Image: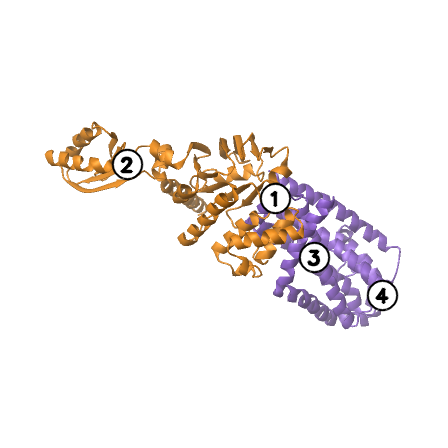
Chain colours: A purple, B orange
C-alpha cells in the first residue's frame, strides 16, 4: 500500500509539473471561469428581478446560484481530458517506460487521477476567489467553501478516472476528444448545473435525477445558497460511492489493457 | 543458470491472429552485447517487449539475471534498464527531472539519485544541460538522456530498442561510442535491436538474424560472415550472355572457388574461399584466352548484408522496401474501395 501511494505521488508529481509549466493552460484556467461568471452573471442577472424566478433559484443573486454550476462545469471541462496524458504517454513510449519500472501498475491511473483532482481543486479555488470579488456570498462561509472544494475535487476524480479508462483503449487524441465532446454537453445540460430542477420539464428532470453532476451540484448549491443542511450528505454520499466504483473500474480496465 | 538473459521458445500471437514471434530461443552471457538484426516488422520489438514483461507472451519463458519474469517480476525489472525506440523522455521536464523521476520509479533514495544522476549525465555529456527543458534538446541528446535514465538504478542488463533509429550518422556514431563504453567500463550486458547492419557489426559480440518472427542464424558477426565464404568477386561482362555462361561454368570448377553465379544485367557473383585478390589475375587471363571482355571487377569481403541475403533470400533493404510496398498497396486498395 505504501509503495502504491509513493508511486502514485510521483506519477501525479510529473503531471502537476507539466500543468504548472504550461502557461497558456494556466492562464485559461483563470480566464475561462472569469468569462463564464461575468458573461452569464450579467446576462441572467435580470432573471432574479422576477420574484417567481428568485424563489425558484432560492436567491436574489443569480451569480450565487450559478457559481456551483460554473465550478462543476470548469472541473468537468478540465478533468474529462485527463485521459489525453495516457494517450501521449503511449505515443512517446513513456507508458512502456513506466510499465518497465518496478512501480505498482495501479499507481499509473491513481497518480493521474490524483493529479486531475488537484488541478480541479486549484481551478475551484480560483473560481471562488473571482466569484467573491464579483459579489457572491457563500452562506456557509469558509467551512462551506472547503466542503464545496472537497465535493468538486471528488467529482474531478470521477471524471479523470472515466477519461483514463476510456483513453487506455484509444490510440489517438482525436478519438478521445470526439467521445468526450459527444458526452460532455448533454451531461452538462441534463443536470441542474445551470438551471434548477424545478423549472425543468418532467422528462428532463427524470434524466437530471440520474445524472451524477446533479448530485455534485446539489450539495454545493445548498452550501452556497441555503446554508448548512443534512440534505448535503445524500449528494456527498453518492459522489463518494461513484468515486470508489470509478477507482476500482479504472484500475481493472488499466491492468487488463496493459497486460494483454 | 549463469546467463544474463535466457529466452526459451518465446511465441507471441496477437489477437488479430498475427504471429509476430514464432518460437525464439536464445541465451546471452553477462557482459555481452547481443544484437537482434532484422527489418522493420521482423519481430524484434515484440521479442524485446515480451522479454522485459511489457507484452504477455503466448508461450515461452524469459529469465533475466536468472529471475523468471513471470514469477519474480519485481526482481526481473530491477535487474534491467530499457530504452524504447520512441525515445521516451518527457519534453516538459528538465533533463535532471527526467532522470530523477526514473530514480523514484526504481525506489531509490534522493541522495542515491543525486549521485547516480550526476554520474549518468556526466557520462553522456549532459551534465551542463541538466536544468534545461528537454524540449530544447536535439534528437541525439534526447536519446542520450533516455539511455542515461535507463541506467539510474545501475542495472546488470540494458535493453535498447533501435537505439539510433532516425538519428544522423554523426550522432549515431556518438551513441555507439557510449554503448561501447557501457560494456567496456561498466560491464553491462546489452541486448539491442537494430536494422542497421553497420551498427550490429560494429557493436555486437553476437547477433541473431530475425525474419518473420524466427531466428534464421545466430553467432559472432565474423563467423556468420566467414560461413558464407571468403571474398566476393563481382564481374560485369561486356560480352554477350550466351558466350559467358560456359566461362562461368569454367570458373565454378576452379580450385578455391565456392560458387560462381550469373545475376541480372550480365553481372557475375563469384564467392572465393580465400585470397580473392590473387584469383582476379587468373580470371582475367582465362577471359583473354576465351575472348571474353570484362568491363569491371569488384572485390569485397562479405558483409552482414550478404549474411542476411544468405539466410533470408533477400537483402535487408529489399525486406524493408517489400514491407513499405505492401503497406502502400494496402492503402491504395483501401482508397479504391472507398471510391
> Alpha carbon of mark 2 to alpha carbon of mark 3: how far?
70 Å
Q: Are marks 2 and 1 on the same chain?
A: no
Image height of B73 relative to A61, above or below:
above
What's the mark number on residue A99? 1
| Residue at figure coordinates x 42%, y 33% from the top left | B219
Marks 3 & 4, CB-CB < 8 Å contact: no
Question: Is tag 3's residue or tag 1's residue first in the polypeptide sequence?
Answer: 3
In this view, the mark in front (2 or 1): 2
Q: CA distance from mark 1 to mark 4?
A: 45 Å
| A225 is higher (above) or lower (below) than B202 | below
Where residue B18 appears, x then y in whole percent?
A: 50, 35
Question: What is the distance, in whole Å, between disc 2 and disc 4 at their CAs?
Answer: 89 Å
The residue that appears at 65% across and 62% down in the rendered structure is A20
Disc 3 to disc 1, how far (Cα)? 29 Å
Rendering quarter of residue A143: bottom right
Q: Which residue is mark 4?
A: A141
Mark 3 and mark 4: Cα distance apart in space:
24 Å
- Quarter in which the N terminus of chain B is drawn: top right
Q: Earlier in the sequence, mark 1 or mark 4?
A: 1
Instruction: Estimate how packed mark 1 is, as few (under 14), some (14 to 19) or many (20 or more) residues with alpha carbons within 10 Å.
Output: some
Q: Residue at x 71, y 52 (%)?
A: A114
Q: Chain of mark 2?
A: B
Chain containing mark 4:
A
Q: Secondary structure at mark 1?
A: helix
| Mark 3 or 4, closer to the camera | 4
Q: Which residue is mark 3?
A: A76
Q: Nearer the observer, disc 2 or disc 4?
A: 2
Amino acid at each position: 500500500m505504501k509503495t502504491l501511494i509513493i508511486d502514485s505521488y510521483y506519477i501525479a508529481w510529473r503531471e502537476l509539473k507539466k500543468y504548472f509549466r504550461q502557461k497558456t493552460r494556466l492562464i485559461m484556467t483563470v480566464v475561462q471561469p472569469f468569462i463564464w461568471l461575468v458573461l452569464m452573471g450579467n446576462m441572467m442577472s435580470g432573471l432574479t428581478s422576477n420574484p417567481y424566478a428568485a424563489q425558484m433559484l432560492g436567491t436574489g443573486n443569480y451569480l450565487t446560484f450559478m457559481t456551483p454550476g460554473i465550478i462543476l462545469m470548469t472541473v468537468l471541462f478540465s478533468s474529462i481530458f485527463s485521459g489525453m496524458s495516457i494517450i501521449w504517454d503511449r505515443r512517446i513510449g513513456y507508458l512502456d517506460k513506466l510499465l518497465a519500472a518496478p512501480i505498482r501498475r495501479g499507481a499509473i491511473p491513481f497518480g493521474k487521477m490524483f493529479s486531475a483532482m488537484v488541478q480541479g481543486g486549484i481551478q475551484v479555488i480560483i473560481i471562488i476567489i473571482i466569484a467573491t470579488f464579483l459579489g457572491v456570498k457563500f452562506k456557509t462561509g469558509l467551512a462551506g467553501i472547503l466542503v464545496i472544494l472537497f465535493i468538486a475535487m471528488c467529482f474531478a476524480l470521477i471524471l479523470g478516472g472515466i477519461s483514463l479508462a476510456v483513453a487506455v483503449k484509444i490510440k489517438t487524441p482525436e478519438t478521445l476528444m470526439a467521445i468526450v465532446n459527444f458526452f460532455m454537453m448533454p451531461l452538462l445540460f441534463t443536470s441542474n448545473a445551470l438551471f434548477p430542477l424545478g423549472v425543468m420539464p418532467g422528462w428532463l428532470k427524470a434524466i437530471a435525477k440520474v445524472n451524477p453532476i446533479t448530485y455534485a451540484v446539489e450539495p454545493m448549491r445548498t452550501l452556497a445558497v441555503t446554508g448548512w443542511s443534512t440534505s448535503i450528505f445524500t449528494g456527498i454520499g453518492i459522489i463518494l460511492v461513484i468515486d470508489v466504483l470509478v477507482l476500482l473500474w479504472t484500475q481493472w480496465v488499466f491492468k487488463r489493457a496493459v497486460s494483454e | 543458470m549463469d546467463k544474463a538473459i535466457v529466452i526459451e521458445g518465446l511465441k507471441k500471437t496477437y489477437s488479430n491472429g498475427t504471429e509476430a514471434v514464432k518460437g525464439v530461443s536464445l541465451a546471452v552471457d553477462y557482459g555481452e552485447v547481443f544484437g537482434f538484426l532484422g527489418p522493420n516488422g521482423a519481430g524484434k520489438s515484440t521479442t524485446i517487449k515480451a522479454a522485459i514483461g511489457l507484452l504477455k507472451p503466448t508461450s515461452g519463458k524469459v529469465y533475466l539475471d536468472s529471475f523468471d519474469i513471470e514469477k519474480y517480476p519485481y526482481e526481473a525489472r530491477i535487474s534491467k534498464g530499457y530504452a524504447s525506440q520512441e525515445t521516451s523522455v518527457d519534453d516538459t521536464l528538465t533533463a535532471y527531472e527526467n532522470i530523477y523521476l526514473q530514480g523514484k520509479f526504481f525506489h531509490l533514495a534522493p541522495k542515491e539519485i543525486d549521485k547516480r544522476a550526476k554520474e549518468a549525465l556526466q557520462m553522456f555529456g549532459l551534465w551542463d544541460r541538466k536544468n534545461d527543458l528537454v524540449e530544447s534538446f536535439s534528437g541525439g541528446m534526447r536519446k542520450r538522456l533516455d539511455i542515461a535514465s535507463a541506467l539510474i538504478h545501475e542495472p546488470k542488463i540494458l535493453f535498447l530498442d533501435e537505439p539510433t533509429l532516425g538519428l544522423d550518422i554523426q550522432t549515431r556514431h556518438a551513441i555507439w561510442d557510449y554503448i561501447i563504453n557501457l560494456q567496456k567500463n561498466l560491464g553491462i550486458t546489452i541486448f539491442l535491436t537494430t536494422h542497421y547492419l553497420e551498427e550490429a557489426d560494429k557493436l555486437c559480440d553476437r547477433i541473431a538474424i530475425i525474419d518473420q518472427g524466427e531466428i534464421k542464424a545466430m553467432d559472432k558477426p565474423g563467423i556468420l560472415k566467414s560461413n558464407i565464404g571468403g571474398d566476393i568477386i563481382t564481374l560485369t561482362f561486356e560480352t554477350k550472355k550466351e558466350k559467358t555462361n560456359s566461362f562461368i561454368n569454367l570458373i565454378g570448377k576452379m580450385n578455391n572457388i565456392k560458387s560462381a553465379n550469373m545475376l541480372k544485367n550480365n553481372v557475375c557473383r563469384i564467392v572465393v574461399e580465400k585470397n580473392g585478390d590473387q584469383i582476379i589475375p587468373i580470371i582475367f587471363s582465362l577471359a583473354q584466352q576465351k575472348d571474353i571482355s570484362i568491363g569491371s571487377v569488384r572485390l569485397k569481403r562479405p558483409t552482414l548484408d550478404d549474411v542476411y541475403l544468405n539466410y533470408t533470400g533477400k537483402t535487408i533493404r529489399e525486406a524493408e522496401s517489400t514491407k513499405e510496398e505492401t503497406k502502400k498497396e494496402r492503402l491504395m486498395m483501401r482508397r479504391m474501395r472507398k471510391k
